[in-house]
Amino acid sequence: MKKTLRFMAVPTLALAAIALSGSPAMAADQSYQSTLGQLNGSAGSGTITLDVTGDQAHVVLKVSGMPATFMDAPYPHVQHIHGGAQGVCPAPSADKDGDKVISTTEGAPSYGAIVTTLSTSGDTSPAAGLDLKVGGQGASYTVDRTFELNAETKAALKAGTAVVVVHGLDPATLSAAGQAAKSDLAPTLPLAATSPALCGTLKAGQMKMPAGGADTGVTQETGTDTGALAVGGGLALIALAGGAYVIRRRTAGAAA
Ligand SMILES: [Cu+2]
């Protein structure tokens, strides 16, 4: 029994090594994130992380609390990265026609045109922007995919003008005028279907301090680095603890 346990300790160490060496390899060139805020009386919430490695973007978009059904089917939420404008979400004053709904067009001076479609599959270009089939489906969903960044999106991320917008409102929450109106983007759809519901500007994650930067004393600089290391070490420790737990259970199972 003692012998078995000693052998079992080896995979635990191996797991720790994988956890430690795995972290730097997965590091993206740059990471962006946003917590999405509500527009147009939406009740939903969402978060997005976008990791850029070379030309590739890995996006994880999590959305919840959105309208669930549309014409007896899961509500399709078209969703995009907009860019090239002010890089902000529209204020209530963006509603120019006074129907109490900020349409996608009315929001454009704030967040710009579609530069990427955060589709659930296939095309991620602006051309897929109104394809309801590849929109997020229903009240809560996650889109986790990797795709090639186009030049417009790269530029918007770099300039800080990239804004994530999830569309699709519950028609019942709109004003009478809003409920009667057709979509500014697709006249066959009601205004609610394409109007923005969630919005957030993609912010770059903190970059690592260049070595030997400001000459303000060693203490301050190592303070920043230690913080980053502590986070990495913490994750590795969790992985290690998890690995040890699994192995202990397996040992117990084999003994029984
Ligand atoms: Cu959009």
Image (cartoon, helix red, strand yellow):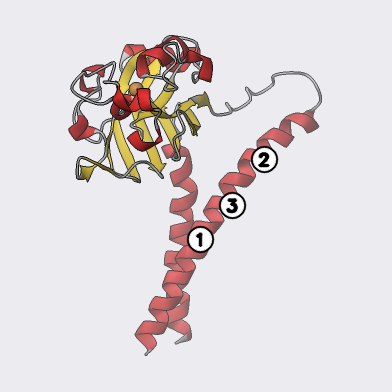
Q: Say if 30 sits above or below 160 in the image.
A: below
- Numbered disc 1: secondary structure: helix
- Numbered disc 2: secondary structure: helix
Identify residue for label 2. Answer: 227
The amino acid type, in three-letter code, at marker 1 is: Leu
Residue at 42 percent of width and 22 percent of height = 101
Q: Is residue 213 visible?
A: yes
The amino acid type, in three-letter code, at marker 3 is: Gly
* Whole-percent x, y for residue 70 in the image: 24, 39
* Whole-percent x, y for residue 49 in the image: 44, 34
Assign the C terminus to one quadrant of the image. Answer: bottom left
Left or right: 189, with 20 as reference point: left
Task: Tell me if the residue at label 2 has its CB under 8 Å from ligand 1.
Answer: no
Instruction: Count neighbours of disc 1 (C-alpha within 10 A) and say few if under 14, some if 14 to 19, many if 20 or more.
Output: many
Instruction: Count neighbours of disc 3 (C-alpha within 10 A) and say few if under 14, some if 14 to 19, many if 20 or more.
Output: few
Q: Residue furthest bottom?
A: 256
Identify residue for label 3. Answer: 234
Identify residue for label 1. Answer: 240
Mark closest to the chain's N terminus, 3 or 2: 2
Q: Quadrant of ligand 1?
A: top left
Residue at 49 percent of width and 12 percent of height = 159
Left or right: 17, with 148 as reference point: right
Mark closest to the chain's N terminus, 1 or 2: 2
Depth check, front residue: 45 or 22? 45
Instruction: Count neighbours of disc 2 (C-alpha within 10 A) and say few if under 14, some if 14 to 19, many if 20 or more.
Output: few
Residue at 34 percent of width and 43 percent of height = 142
Mark closest to the chain's N terminus, 3 or 1: 3
